[in-house]
Amino acid sequence: MKHKDGKYHSQPEKPFKIVPATLLVIVLCGFSFYLGGIFCSEKSRLEGKSVQDVSKTVSSPKEPAVDPLQIKSMAFPECSADFQDYTPCTDPRRWRKYGSHRLTFLERHCPPMLERKQCLVPPPDGYKPPIRWPKSRDECWYRNVPYNWINKQKSNQNWLRKQGEKFLFPGGGTMFPRGVGAYVDLMQDLIPEMRDGTVRTAIDTGCGVASWGGDLLDRGILTVSLAPRDNHEAQVQFALERGIPAILGVISTQRLPFPSNSFDMAHCSRCLIPWTEFGGIYLLEVHRVLRPGGFWVLSGPPVNYENRWRGWNTTVEEQKSDYEKLEGLLTSMCFKMYAKKDDIAVWQKSSDSSCYNKLAEPDVYPAKCDDSLEPDSAWYTPLRPCVVVPKPELKKSALESLPKWPERLQVAPERISNVPGGSSSALKHDDSKWKVRAKHYKKLLPALGTNEIRNVMDMNTVYGGFAAAVIDDPLWTMNVVSSYAANTLPVVYDRGLIGTYHDWCEAFSTYPRTYDLLHLDGLFTAESHRCDMKYVLLEMDRILRPKGYALIRESSYFIDAIASIAKGLKWSCRREDTEYGVAKEKLLVCQKKLWYSASSSSR
């Protein structure tokens, strides 16, 4: 190697190369570690400026503390008064964007993200806490549902009557002029299974003000009353205001958000659904959600056409033709006539596999559905012109094979084996767990179990355990199963409870101010990767009645952030321990404040 004196000196090269390389690696590693420390320190400093502590975490000596999610406190403005009945996914303001064919505009069409409202929906001027159950079944405050249109249009049918500050519900209807009680009495004469606990769950399509479903409650039958959002009648809002289960919906181009083979009975009283049109596709959907052995009840056109045709603005020949088409279509779907008297006709869905086997033959209509679509797929799933055939292996899900109510609530349904990890022992454990939890909840929220709380929603149930634990209280529970979760809703229905599929990244199919209690168990833990917590809580505020409650069971990681957002919703919340006092899970007991719009005269 040549040095600066110009002479070459003989030196061993190997040690010379190794020593500088080793030093270089050591220097570079140290420098990287130093830079990393600076970066992490700066990142922590910046994050510390951008978040705000809601409250300190309560830790347990038995378990490690959980660092909470921290979020900036926020305040939400009031929506304008014309949003008092805002239903985001069935908004009449947006109907003109969608087609009228088969009433497509009445289906769910949720606003895109940029059009979502970030404001608090105000109550109507003069709103007051609803009348308590059971008195509410027969009357409600006019100012809570201030729509007299239906009273004027249907006054001759005795649906409801305005008297002073109240609406009264005498129990009349188009097809039951002698009152809904007499109408259901006749129906029970035709279907004795309504009396002995065989029939437990029902769906009423085109429910009016849900008087039929309200009457059945005293008879041990739990009904989902279904009607579309409309500009005038607010039928579902009337039903929920009265304390009767109901949901916004319409049979159009999409499946209803219920599992197949679930309801024990389906009912239509002059609901004006064109059952025989479009290849009978609407009736095929009723067939899908009705369990084998279940009953389909129709009153109104074309039943009893011989005596009724003059009042239907048609001819006897047309009505006779319509009735024959209906009979033929029902027979082709494996329905059989069960009973008929006066204005009521009853068909029963067959449990006999031999009838369904014939649907696989060529040139048969409607044909058997193929296996390309799961029969329980029911969230934005198109209707198909085919028959969903009950699975032959599920023999104990037919109506005649189920235990009678209330025994069926405690028996593990056959379909629980379709749920990952589902079993009889899993259901028993779940029920035991919820009995302990419900007892604890009633200590924290004494209103639970009294008539102060009537309309309840379990926002992310598994087997309906919470609903089962409070089954003897004067309330009903809408059990919601996430469209992204394991499909446990068939189990809920097989137990004799009701519910629906839903995606909490969207608005629920109901009017504002329709639930007294919202309960959730780990919803944000399960869905926070998909759904913005802020919008979920805004939706909870929309559907919660003023002075109603939210019972939030969550990971300690989310509790403080939820409390921060809830404060912006004008909720008062307190943090509580769970029944076992573990640190990793907490309860938030919240109550929504009753407030009025700035432009309201009630302020």
Image (cartoon, rainbow, N blue to C red):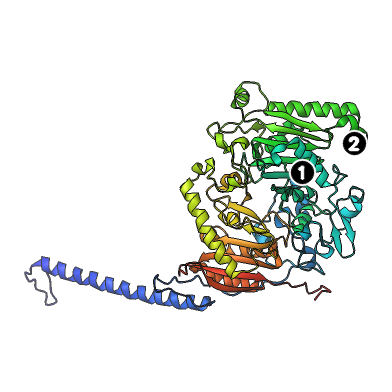
Q: Which residue bears the numbered disc 2?
A: 312
Percent position of residue 435, x then y: 54, 59
Rendering quarter of residue 294? top right
Q: Within 10 Å of the Cα at label 1, are there few (<14), some (14-19), or many (20+) other Cα atoms?
A: some
Most foreground residue, 197 or 548: 197
Percent position of residue 51, x then y: 52, 75
Q: Amino acid under label 1?
A: Leu
Q: Within 10 Å of the Cα at label 2, are there few (<14), some (14-19), or many (20+) other Cα atoms?
A: few
Residue 189 is at least partly visible in this image: yes
In space, the residues marked 1 and 2 are separated at their CA atoms by 22 Å
Q: Which residue bears the numbered disc 1?
A: 103
Q: Quadrant of the C terminus?
A: bottom right
478 with respect to 157 (left or right): left
Rendering quarter of residue 278? top right
Q: Secondary structure at mark 2?
A: helix
Residue visible at 71% across and 28% down in the picture: 336
